[in-house]
């Protein structure tokens, strides 16, 4: 005879084998009703588990009505503790193998979010029926997420492999999961089953089918299903309107909305449709339409719905009507966290980042618990104005709320840290997530580019491609900017090929980024070709081409293009005038430079900034008008710091004006310059004047201030290898041969080289031998050495950084 303790142990082991865990455990009760969220009718109430069967049909042997009644109550209230008690009671009655009871348990655990437990019980069911499959499929589809949606697809395949025919509830769950995947592959097969089974006409199936096609990008197919539906409810209409809205097809969304207004029944719920159409109005030109829809909501008495009030706040914010958004926010009597989030995000998107942070502080003081979207809005505001301290506080608050694994929140954190220059922290946030979307990849790539770590940006882009993530416009624009900064024409051409492969046109920002890349790499012909083919050119596109011409010594062409820009009616901005005044500087056009400088404020109402003053100082300095330059600097009405005096000092050295050079240099010393070039140039002027005591004073001051001269570094790509050189380089494996070639060139005067620490060893024809090469230059810290490394490509395995490789060899 088995003793009681042994019986309990055996029973517990059997329960664990069948259900995955014992019948007694510690769980957290989920009281979702306390959230007060109105659920859409449909899939939540129609999981495929027929309530009449569980309450009126004959029960399995040994079961009473009370057990199943308690099960239904637990499911209805999402009471996990009570449900587990019912589970234990079913086990005690010995009816846990009954299919009907097992289905109830699967349905209960799935609706409580305990999908692993539900799946474990499902696997233990010997005779699965369609209700068994529906309970689990519906649970996973309602849970959302990529992983859960893939599980739904796998369950559907297994169901069909066992020759079990799905019903309407199964198909609704399939379509919803396929919507989350934004794919229609399995969904089309399920659609064929709908037709084959004559299930078309079930409003929940049809609505889910419309949603699947719309979210998968096949809006026309969704419209066909929508048009043939014999019956539509408000959720069907909102799904169709949202399909057009998410694709930016505002006119079609408005047409469907107008059709709804004509066909809707009096007294029917229509707030979801209004919310959907308002979400499509996300540009200033649509603010008039938004006001009309606002008026219709007031006329129909719908402003009492919080979701609709939130949609109106969001609409006005996206249409850049912050005053109306604030009025709508202030008039909302029943604000929830979404209302606050909409207003915070509105401030952030309209450049009022400080106001967004203040509003969040008000929300926090009012004791309202923020959602992850509120946190995201405030993080974006901190990101825009580089509020790193406040961003870190929000990071800790986010951890406290348990949002650290949420994709949107992590993406905002990565973006905030990257823009603040904390790339190590941004990388930690990126690495902590397993499922990464294109926004997260783009945030980190953009962060590397903004912080001039262009090689790491290209390596990360290749990893993104390997992971199968499809890039978007900002991704490609950032990668092209990285290629521009590195002057890597061949890589830039590969990225150009990727833009064509992924179906990107030459619209902004891709067109302007491509034009900039080609011009910065010296390929003006290709840059101009891209520019001329760019449709709907904005000021950024014009600036990119004007800048490229100016920096490649074609100042006349740059000024002609500026005149063409004005003739086409495009209004210039601050950057435009920096480019054209710079072009005047390179060409020596002093009068035209003055003309453009005054045109900014007189004709376009733009106040000159430090960059414009610097360009004018350069114009005057290059023309040798050093006295006028000094007077212009001293009359400047802005705080220019050291910038303008540094340009004058360099000009004085070039023109041999030692007296004025001493004046500019001493000004920089008094202002506490940290640039090594300032000390070097001033010491050189004093040396030319024979004032050796002042030379010693400058060098001593340089040492006292801890300023060290950074040595030059050059690199060139030949035959898929990067050759890196620094001053007094001894680490390159072919340094002796390189020196011999340089000496030979000097003797033949084919390649005149300056005898200065900034000499570049590049453009060596004997090294090229018909191999195309790209080159670049930057300053590196003392102690770094040169070397060779494989050139980075956008395919294959790792692409080590050329500079990093040089650093490693120097350390050895």
Image (tube, rainbow, N blue to C red):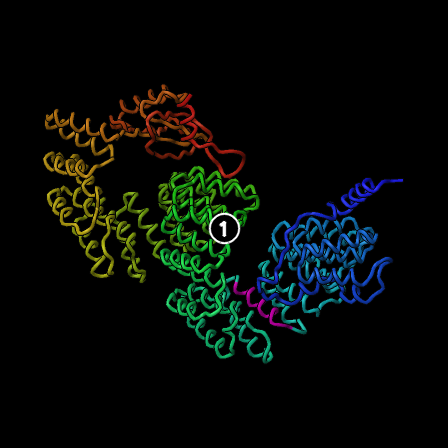
Question: Which of the 4 image quadrants contains residue 713?
Answer: top left
- Residue 710 within the magenta-colored segment of the rendering: no
Quarter the C terminus occupies: top left
Q: Residue 238 colored magenta?
A: yes
User: Which residue is pictured at 49% across the width and 52% down the height?
Assistant: 504
Numbered disc 1: secondary structure: helix
What is the x, y in percent for residue 641?
A: 21, 44
The image shows residue 473, relative to residue 709, as above or below, that is: below
- Residue 418's spot in the image, x, y percent? 42, 44
Residue ID at (46%, 40%): 458
In this view, the residue farthest toward the front is 4
Predominant SS of the magenta segment: helix
Magenta residues? 232-245
Quadrant of res 725: top left
The answer to which of 110 and 806 lies nearer the viewer is 110
Instruction: Look at 39% across and 55% down and name the residue there.
Output: 357
Most foreground residue, 41 or 748 = 41
Task: State whether residue 445 is above or below residue 221.
Answer: above
Quarter of the picture containing the N terminus is top right
The percent coordinates of residue 60 (x first, y second) are 85, 59
Residue 507, image x, y percentages? 43, 55
* Residue labelled with disc 1: 409
Instruction: Give the residue displayed 83% in from the left and 59% down from the top.
Output: 63
């Amino acid at each position: 005879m088995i003793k009681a303790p042994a019986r309990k142990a055996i029973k517990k082991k059997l329960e664990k084998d069948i259900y995955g865990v014992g019948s007694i455990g510690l769980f957290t009760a989920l009281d979702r009703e306390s959230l007060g969220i109105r659920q859409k009718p449909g899939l939540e109430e129609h999981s495929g588990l027929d309530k009449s069967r569980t309450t009126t049909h004959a029960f399995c042997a040994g079961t009473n009505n009370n057990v199943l009644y308690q099960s239904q109550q637990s499911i209805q209230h999402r009471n996990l503790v009570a449900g587990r008690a019912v589970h234990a009671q079913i086990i005690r009655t010995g009816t846990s193998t009954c299919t009907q009871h097992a289905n109830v348990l699967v349905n209960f655990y799935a609706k409580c979010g305990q999908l692993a437990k539900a799946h474990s019980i499902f696997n233990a069911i010997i005779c699965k029926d369609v209700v068994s499959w529906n309970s689990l499929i519906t649970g996973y589809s309602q849970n959302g997420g990529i992983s859960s949606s893939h599980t739904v697809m796998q369950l559907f395949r297994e169901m069909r492999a066992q020759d079990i025919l799905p019903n309407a509830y199964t198909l609704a769950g399939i379509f919803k999961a396929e919507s989350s995947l934004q794919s229609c592959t399995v969904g089309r097969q399920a659609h064929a089953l709908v037709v084959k089974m004559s299930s078309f006409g079930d409003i929940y199936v049809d609505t889910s089918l419309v949603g699947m096609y719309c979210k998968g990008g096949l809006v026309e197919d969704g419209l066909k299903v929508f048009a043939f539906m014999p019956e539509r409810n408000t959720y069907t209409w909102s799904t169709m309107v949202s399909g057009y809205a998410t694709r930016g097809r505002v006119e079609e969304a408005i047409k469907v909305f107008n059709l709804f207004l004509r066909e809707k029944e009096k007294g029917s719920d229509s707030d979801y449709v209004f919310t959907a159409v308002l979400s499509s109005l996300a540009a200033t030109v649509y603010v008039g339409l938004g006001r009309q829809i606002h008026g219709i909501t007031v006329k129909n008495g719908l402003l009492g719905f919080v979701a609709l009030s939130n949609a109106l706040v969001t609409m006005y914010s996206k249409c850049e009507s912050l005053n109306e958004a604030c009025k709508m926010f202030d008039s909302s009597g029943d604000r929830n966290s979404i209302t606050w989030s909409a207003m915070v995000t509105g401030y952030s998107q309209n450049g009022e980042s400080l106001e967004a942070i203040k509003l969040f502080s008000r929300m926090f003081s009012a004791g309202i618990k923020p959602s992850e979207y509120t946190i995201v809005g405030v993080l974006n505001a901190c990101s825009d104005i580089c509020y790193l301290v406040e961003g870190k506080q929000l990071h800790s608050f986010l951890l406290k709320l348990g949002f650290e694994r949420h994709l949107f929140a992590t993406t905002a954190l990565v973006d905030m840290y990257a823009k603040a220059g904390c790339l190590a922290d941004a990388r930690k946030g990126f690495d902590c997530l397993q499922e990464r979307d294109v926004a997260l990849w783009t945030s980190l790539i953009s962060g590397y580019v903004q912080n001039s770590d262009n090689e790491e940006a290209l390596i990360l882009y290749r990893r993104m491609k390997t992971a199968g993530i499809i890039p978007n416009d900002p991704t490609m624009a950032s990668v092209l900017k990285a290629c521009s900064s590195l002057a890597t024409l061949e890589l830039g051409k590969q990225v150009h090929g990727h833009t064509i492969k992924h179906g990107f046109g030459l619209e902004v920002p891709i067109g302007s980024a491509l034009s900039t890349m080609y011009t910065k790499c010296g390929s003006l012909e290709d840059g101009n070709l891209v520019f001329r083919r760019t449709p709907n050119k904005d000021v950024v596109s014009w600036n990119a081409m004007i800048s490229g011409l100016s920096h490649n010594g074609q100042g006349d062409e740059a000024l002609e293009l500026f005149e063409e820009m004005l003739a086409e009616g495009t209004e210039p901005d601050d950057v435009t005038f920096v480019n054209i005044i710079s072009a005047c500087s390179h060409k020596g056009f002093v009068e035209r430079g003055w003309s453009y400088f005054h045109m900014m404020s007189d004709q376009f109402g733009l106040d000159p900034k430090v960059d414009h003053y610097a360009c004018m100082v350069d114009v005057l300095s290059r023309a040798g008008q050093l006295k006028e330059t000094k007077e212009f600097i001293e009359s400047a009405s802005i705080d220019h710091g050291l910038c303008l005096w540094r340009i004058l000092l360099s000009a004085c050295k070039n023109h041999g004006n030692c007296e004025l050079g001493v004046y500019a240099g001493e000004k920089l010393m008094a202002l506490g310059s940290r640039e090594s070039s300032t000390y070097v140039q001033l010491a050189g002027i004093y040396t030319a004047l024979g004032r050796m005591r002042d030379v010693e004073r400058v060098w001593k001051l340089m040492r006292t201030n801890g300023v060290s001269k950074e040595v030059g570094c050059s690199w060139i790509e030949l035959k898929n290898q990067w050759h890196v050189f620094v001053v007094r380089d001894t680490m390159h494996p072919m340094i002796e041969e390189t020196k011999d070639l340089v000496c030979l060139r000097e003797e033949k005067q084919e390649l005149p080289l300056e005898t200065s620490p900034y000499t570049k060893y590049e453009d060596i024809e004997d090294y090229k031998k018909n191999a195309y090469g790209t080159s670049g230059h930057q300053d590196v810290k003392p102690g770094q050495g040169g070397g060779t490394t494989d050139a980075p490509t956008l395919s294959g395995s790792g692409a080590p950084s050329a500079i990093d490789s040089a650093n490693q060899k120097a350390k050895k």
